[in-house]
Image (cartoon, rainbow, N blue to C red):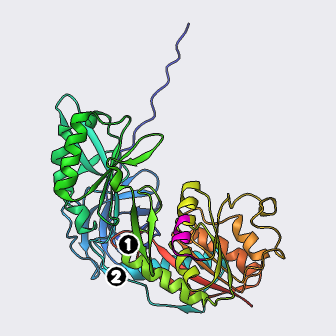
Amino acid sequence: MAQIYKPQPRQVKAEALKQQLVVGLDHQGRGVVRTPKGARFVGGALPGEVISLMPRGKYEAELIDITEASSERVMPPCAYYASCGGCDLQHLELHAQRRHKQQVVEQMLQKFAQLSPEQWLEPLTDNAWNYRRRARLAVHYDRKRQQLKLGFRAAKSKQIVAINDCLTLTKSLNDLLKPLRTLLPKLSLVRQLGHVELIDLNPKPIVLLRVETAPVEADTQALQLFAEQYSVAIWLATEHSVKPLNAHDATVSYQTLGAALHCKPNDFLQTHQQLSEKMVAQALSWLAIEPQDTILELYAGSGNFTIPMALQGAQVTAVEGVHSMVEQLAENAKRYAVKVNAVCANLEQPWPQQGWAGSKFDQPFTKVLLDPARAGAPHAIGEVAKRQPQRIVYVSCAPDTLARDANVLKQNGYQLKRAQVIDMFPQTHHIEVITLFERE
């Protein structure tokens, strides 16, 4: 069979672009540079800076050098910042980080909903360091060298950056990093270890090990000694279960506004404890809860907002899609003897077919609170609007989907009264925002 020669496409070597002006930040916190071949997004660059960059791919570029630095640039205090993918805004002064996050929300609301809030409140803030109460550590064990690498993934890479400490972790979690690096290579289960999760809960921090099978006796003894020495609870997560190594560690909880809620280590948990409580307080204040209110809460989790609302005397219907969290929510409501109807339902399925929802006339909810994941509430928001509640508080971790859903509320006669950035993730580009909508 004849073979036809096909020349390989010529590889064009990228050349550095010098003296480039950074004109802004995008929603991921990357510097924006306008070049003759289009925009480039440069991690680590700040508005107003003059830089040199190396094109990487179609749109991105690598920061090579800074000729003129921004007055808002600061020296990142973390020794791992240049390689670790956990943080991406440590080089930007803290107040400027918060200002940028509000600008992102403003831009998204204008772009997708042509909306501006009647009032912007100053950002809700708290500790900017040692705030993170949950972290998943990547693990790689080199069997030939019998060496363990424990840390965070590098930015846009599967490579693991080994760390000894993390400035964003709570102190109790940070203090476990070095001891874990010493312990894990001594265990036979290190060969089947998927990842390690650290969670700062009450009554003590949790080390959650993702494993394929239960540990052997020698590993169990070593883990128990570690747990006693460092005052932690060891939990094991397999494909089918999440259980504590010791039964007496089974009851764990987190603090919300006015209540301590039982949970499981794999339940959703807001990253920043202090700001989570401030956020709940703000949501309740905006809802202006009265004892006669019937409140619909969507994406309720284990009750972070639910129980505080019910403790103010409201009747709450709390809907969550994860069955185990609904059970936990119901248990928390029972412990506090409050009026909560805990429902497990897929909110993106038609509501009229779900018994808890009925029609808009069957369930006259006066107020609604929703705190969805990044995907927002593409179907649920329309169902909410049909029921015409007086007030809606929407908490979001994704300004683009918030703006999309806000447009639905706008088209159904709602005004955006207030908005406030919550700096839940300092030193990163991630955004949390709380908004209040009222009917015209």
| Range of magenta residues | 331-338
Where residue 27 sits in the image (x, y, percent)?
47, 69
Graded by Cα atoms within 10 Å as few (under 14), some (14 to 19) or many (20 or more), the crowding at tag 1 reads many
**Residue 118 falls in which quadrant of the image?**
bottom right
The kind of secondary structure element at disc 2 is loop
Q: Residue at x 55, y 9 (%)?
A: 2
Which is more toward the observer, 129 or 104?
Answer: 129
Name the residue tied to disc 2. Answer: 126
Separation of residues labelled 2 and 1 (CA atoms): 9 Å
**Residue 270 falls in which quadrant of the image?**
bottom left
Where residue 91 sits in the image (x, y, percent)?
28, 72
Where residue 384 sits in the image (x, y, percent)?
73, 73
The kind of secondary structure element at disc 1 is loop
Q: Which mark is residue 100?
A: none
Q: Pick whichever of labels 2 and 1 is earlier in the sequence.
A: 2
Q: Are marks 2 and 1 in contact (CB under 8 Å)?
A: yes
Q: Is residue 254 magenta?
A: no
